[in-house]
């Protein structure tokens, strides 16, 4: 049974940092993060191949967010720096992420963790 369990969300001031973790059960060819702000569609944030050799980010988080993985722990991380109020969203850990022409989709989703950035 596939399980993706996020942790590390909460409240942070603008300019601050936060790290999200996702403990996964199962084997996947890639893992990543999506986010959904109130009233908006889910948005791809970034993903990493399970080998770690390929990493992709959406433009708005490049240079601020870093995805990494620990194969021994079957865990993926999202380090978020220089956070902005517009980063406020529910962040979902995802697995088997595919990047298609201009979009991304995921085969599995966690339950999500709230990240709130105050101004």
Image (cartoon, rainbow, N blue to C red):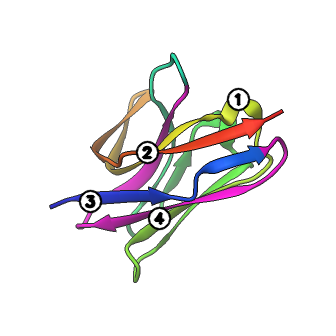
Q: Which residues are magenta?
A: 13-37
Query: In the rendered view, would you say 79 is above or below 102?
Result: below
Outermost residue, bottom direction?
72
Q: Are marks 2 and 4 in contact (CB under 8 Å)?
A: no
Depth check, mark 2 against mark 4: the one in front is 2
Depth check, mark 1 against mark 4: the one in front is 1
Q: Secondary structure at mark 4?
A: strand
Q: Position of residue 45 (x, y in %)?
A: 54, 41
- Residue 67 position by quadrant: bottom right
Q: Quadrant of the N terminus?
A: bottom left
- Residue 8 position by quadrant: bottom right
> Of marks 4 and 3, which one's residue comes earlier in the chain?
3
Residue that numbered label 2 is attached to: 112
> Of marks 1 and 2, which one's residue comes earlier in the chain?
1
Q: Position of residue 4 (x, y in %)?
A: 33, 57
Q: Is residue 9 magenta?
A: no
Give whichever of 24, 96 is nearer the camera: 24
Residue that numbered label 3 is attached to: 3
How much space separates mark 4 and mark 3, taking CA atoms? 13 Å
Q: Secondary structure at mark 2?
A: loop
């Amino acid at each position: 049974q596939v399980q993706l369990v996020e942790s590390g969300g909460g409240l942070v001031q603008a300019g601050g940092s936060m790290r999200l973790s996702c403990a996964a059960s199962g084997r996947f060819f890639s893992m990543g993060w999506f986010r959904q702000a109130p009233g908006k569609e889910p948005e791809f944030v970034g993903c990493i191949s399970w080998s770690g050799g390929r990493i992709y980010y959406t433009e708005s988080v490049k240079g601020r967010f870093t995805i990494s993985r620990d194969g021994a722990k079957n865990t993926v991380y999202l380090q978020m720096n220089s956070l902005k109020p517009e980063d406020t969203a529910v962040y979902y850990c995802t697995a088997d992420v595919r990047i298609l022409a201009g979009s991304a989709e995921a085969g599995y989703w966690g339950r999500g963790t709230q990240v709130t950035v105050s101004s």
